[in-house]
Image (tube, rainbow, N blue to C red):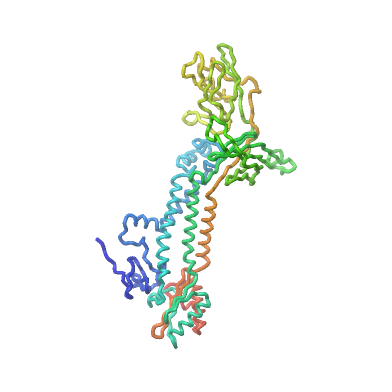
Amino acid sequence: MLTFENTKCECGHQNPVGTVLCEHCGNPLDGEEAESDAPLEMRYDGIARRSQKTNPSPIDRVWNFFSSVKIAVRLIVITLIAAMIGTIFTQENAFISFDPTTYYEERYGWIGKWYYKLGFSNTYESWWFIGLLVMIGTSLVICSLDRVLPLYRALNKQQIRKHNTFLTRQKTVYASDIEGSAENWTAAMAKELKRKHYKVHQEGDALLAEKYRFSRWGPYINHIGLIVFLLAVLLRTLPGWAMDNYVTVTEGDTVQIPETNYYVKNEKFTINYYTDAELPESLKGTARAKLYETKAVLYECEADCDDPSKQPQLKEVKRHNIIVNDPLSYKGIKAYQFGFDDTPKLKAVHPVLIDHKTGQTYGPFDLVMRNPELTYKLGPYTLELRQTYMDFALNSEGKPTTKSKEPNAPAFVFVMKGPDLAADGVPYMYFPKQTDKARFSQDLINGDLAKRFELKVPTMEGVEFAGVMTSLNIRSDRAMPYIWVGAGISMFGLLLGSYWHHRRIWLRIDGGRVTLGAHTNKNNYGMRAEVASALRGLGVVVEPKSLDNGRNKS
């Protein structure tokens, strides 16, 4: 059943439903507010807000949910807790190469296992965390619109002559009989207030003095800054807006930077260590890097970039010697020196295929660890590469996996085709390192095929080791300027709302008696002091404390 509320004030002004104080004269309309003698609630000057509708529609209910400050605070608290949980263990994107399905459990036990399963290892890029940011942004927008529009209407429609009840129920009040002309007294008061930088509006024997109104917009400017900040953060989740990757480049090699059309080459890696004379006694005899530097070249691919069968055509665009905190920078992409690895790593092997049945040896052929060819022709036999594991291991289910992208324990799965073999070929697994061959039982895996065929590196001359490997952190963040803009706007809003306080003074004279009411959103003590000082200029000496309404001590 619909109910109708009479919102017409005794002054004759028809107010919107939900209005607490008359928009025209300020007289309380709400029953409880009208019967009370406590200072008025002056937030938005009593103007109705959409979230205060008595019969909300479904859309209004959604609006009311997001316009609630309590809901906004809860969303922020939940987001902060989630962000803190995300810092307990290292996030997945902070590692160069590792298998997250096994890493967290092996490193941190059952806690790490559930940390990964619940998705906290990828907190800041997860759908639920991004959803929380979207909800906070929505709350900021709706909270602001629900309050800034009524505030604008209230401040834009201010009336000079206010109801006596409105004046006597402010936090700062003065009432007294005066002698002489009411208009002259009002004009003299206006002159004193102007000296204090108030903007004065006078209407006969009534006036409105106001200053620092702009400070009321501070919280909403702050909200705008936060919204820009959140939008910029969300932009970083879109492809091409932000990148934080790691690449490892062996000395002399060129690798593609993921998600880009650029390639980086490690022309030379230099590392200098501290001498024992430069180290304290406790560290003497240990290898401590003093300086490590990558002479890097950045290339841009101009043709055949996405064709794996062709060599990409690269154009040099930048050279830079990368050291810690001095990255290579080009068009928003920065390559930081992250680390290095000077332990010997396999670069390539040159094995031969031995047929124990015939005694024939075929090869050698070139088998590189990174980006190997897919087919090798060895006499009457063909090896087709089907699977590569750079760091071979078995997971908890006993299935093959790779622990990293580095050739620590390389393994290759071929399909061998040729005479006396099945038409579809026979699988053959090959471990280039002799220790891995024994550790993972290569011959047992290959079964009967291992009795006849063997891939073997005849001498150490058939083994190539890579040079020092440098690790580069590749970063690109197109959203960062907007993040700084949002932060700047937010700080500007905080400054407005913190260092200036909106102050208003209303005054009217009726039958030789002046009634003055003053309001400020902050620092009532300063407000009373200014009113007392203005009255003193008219020869009226009052103590600032005596202007306190008395029903609200501040």
Q: Where is residue 539 in the image (x, y as percent from the top left)?
A: 50, 85
Q: Position of residue 107 (x, y in %)?
A: 53, 38
Left or right: residue 238 compared with residue 285: left
Considering only vertical position in the picture, is 451 above or below 280?
A: above
The reply to whether residue 320 is in sight is yes
Quarter of the image with the N terminus is: bottom left
Residue placed farthest to the top in the image?
358
Considering only vertical position in the picture, is 439 above or below 92?
A: above
Q: Position of residue 149 (x, y in %)?
A: 41, 63
Residue placed farthest to the left in the image?
1
Considering only vertical position in the picture, is 91 above or below 208?
A: above
Name the residue located 50 percent from the left edge and 26 percent from the top edge.
386
The reply to whether residue 548 is in sight is no
Please tell me how many numbered marks the rendered image carries.
Answer: 0
Question: 184 or 439: nearer the eye?
Answer: 184
Question: 505 or 543: nearer the eye?
Answer: 505
Residue placed farthest to the right in the image?
277
